[in-house]
Image: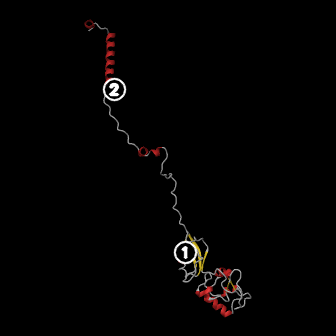
Amino acid sequence: MRIRWGLAPRTLAALALVLVAAVGLAAFHFWSVRPQGVRAPETVEAGAAAVAEDPLRATGADPVPRPVAGTPPSPPPEPAGEIVVDVSGKVHRPGVQRLPAGSRVADALRAAGGVRAGTDVTGLNRARVLMDGEQVAVGLPQAPAAPGATGGAAGTPGTAGPAALLSLSVATKEQLETLPGVGPVLAQHIIDHRTENGGFRSVDELRQVNGIGDRRFADLLPLVQP
């Protein structure tokens, strides 16, 4: 072999190294140019899609306020409530009435059964908004109504006081019915009491009349005299 080819062992080794290097380069070249699979695009998240559709959200200028996580929803508005008024005088059902807040005098009159026929309501503002705890007096005297009794004796005529007080001793049944909370039955009880006792010598005697309690007496006290 040496004689025929004339190659030394070192030359054979060098040729072998060159051959191995050439094979390696060829293998690297074919590996680098091989076909590769293409990855599909990732799915766009819902939040990114919403930002793409509405640019305002990307800047934080969301026109619709969003509830904060962990914050309880606002409670519904409370009802407006109600008021309590006292309707007295010439109405069909005088007494305490419960009405929705914001009601007017006309609403209170309807709740009390309406105004009696022939009652003058010229000075009554039926469009006025009511306040809780107030009294609506219908048909009460606005001027001196009946002669008073200065000495307290029954049937003794006198002059009306500066507050136009109604005399319990001489007032008619119709005049008594103009007082707050006094209807036809209670007015007759007052007349029967003064007939049996010879009139009223003091306003405190109203407590002895059937149907007049402490509250009604307190309402009548500033409006009457013996």
Q: Secondary structure at mark 2?
A: helix
The quadrant in which the N terminus is found is: top left
Q: Quadrant of the C terminus?
A: bottom right
Instruction: Specify the amino acid type for callout 1.
Output: Ala
The residue under the point 26% across, 6% down is 3
Q: Earlier in the sequence, mark 1 or mark 2?
A: 2
Name the amino acid type tagged 2: Ser
- Residue at image x 66%, y 93%? 195
> Neighbour class for label 1 at 10 Å: few (<14), some, many (≥20)?
some
196 relative to 31 in the view: left or right: right
Q: Is residue 116 above or below residue 134?
A: below
Q: Which mark is residue 32?
A: 2
Q: Are marks 1 and 2 in contact (CB under 8 Å)?
A: no
Q: Position of residue 173 (x, y in %)?
A: 61, 88
Using the rendered view, name the quadrant where residue 80 is placed: bottom right
Disc 1 designates what residue? 106
User: What residue lies at 47% left-to-right and 44% top-to-bottom?
Assistant: 58
Quadrant of residue 99 within the rendered picture: bottom right
Residue 29 at x, y percent in the picture: 32, 23
Q: Position of residue 81 (x, y in %)?
A: 55, 68
The reply, left or right, for residue 118 in relation to residue 35 is right
